[in-house]
Image: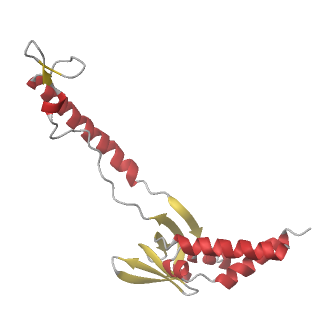
Amino acid sequence: MKTICFTLLFFLSFTLANAQGIKPYIAILKTQNGKYKGILYKVDSVNAILNHDGEFIKVPIKEIKTVQIRTIKKGYKGMSFIKIGEDRAEEYKRDASGKMVDKWGKEEPTFKEDAAATVFSVVFTALANAVAIPIHAINPNVARFNFRQKDDHQLNEFSYYSIYYQANPNVMAELHRLKTISASFKP
């Protein structure tokens, strides 16, 4: 019974993993020779391959000191609080005394009041976007690896973020890993 449940759980997780699709990650590799940044394409036992503006960069694993993995963020679109092209004819109607009023009886603003409200709206929009853009630009690390002490387990976890591994997962290695984890829970 335990084996059947484990097998069903494995195939369910495998099906869900394949249904999610491939998600690219930005990798920032610090080496002895400098710093490399790009989309993590593939990691093997010798090289980490990054895609930087359509050009593939091979970075030897032996030279890597630290790795930072980040998600790719979509571009920020500014907020807009200005209503351009409002149709005043529908909003205000002439009452019995000849004044333009809205449905609650409030008079139509004068040109000076309307201009002041527009200037305030423009300034407020600019300030709101000036604050929101730097906050949006913050891109925290999803994962961080320190390769000063070489560890195969750490290299495997690093490879999970690569496009190649997401497209071609090593299912047998993952099954073996799940078996060793489940064996450690047995009384």
> Which residue, as the protein is rendered here, is positioned at the far top?
97
Which quadrant holds the N terminus?
Answer: bottom right
- Of residues 120 and 62, the one drawn nearer to the viewer in this rendering: 120
**Left or right: 118 in relation to 45:** left
Above-or-below relation of 122 to 102:
below
* Percent of width and height locating residue 88: 14, 31
Q: How is the image coloured?
A: secondary structure
* Image spot of residue 12 (x, y percent): 67, 72
Furthest residue toward bottom: 46
Query: Which residue is at the far right?
Result: 187
Of residues 182 and 71, which is closer to you in this image? 182
Quarter of the picture holding the C terminus: bottom right
Q: Residue at 26% across / 35% down in the picture?
A: 124
Image spot of residue 66 (x, y percent): 54, 70
Task: Kindly tell me whether residue 81 is visible in this rendering.
Answer: yes
Count of numbered marks: 0
- The image quarter containing residue 83 is top left
Q: Looking at the picture, does residue 134 appear above or below residue 39?
A: above
Is 111 situated left or right of 58 in this image? left
Q: Is residue 158 visible?
A: no
Name above or below for residue 128 compared with residue 115.
below
Residue 53, compared with residue 71, is above or below; it is below
Q: Residue at x 33, y 54 (%)?
A: 76
Q: Going by the picture, which residue comes out furthest to the front? A: 96
Foreground of the two, 4 or 186: 4
Which residue is found at the position 49% from the left and 74% from the top?
22
Residue 100's spot in the image, x, y percent?
12, 20
Q: Which of 71/23 is in front?
A: 23
Quarter of the view holding residue 151: bottom right
Instruction: Report the side of 82 relative to 68 (left or right).
Output: left
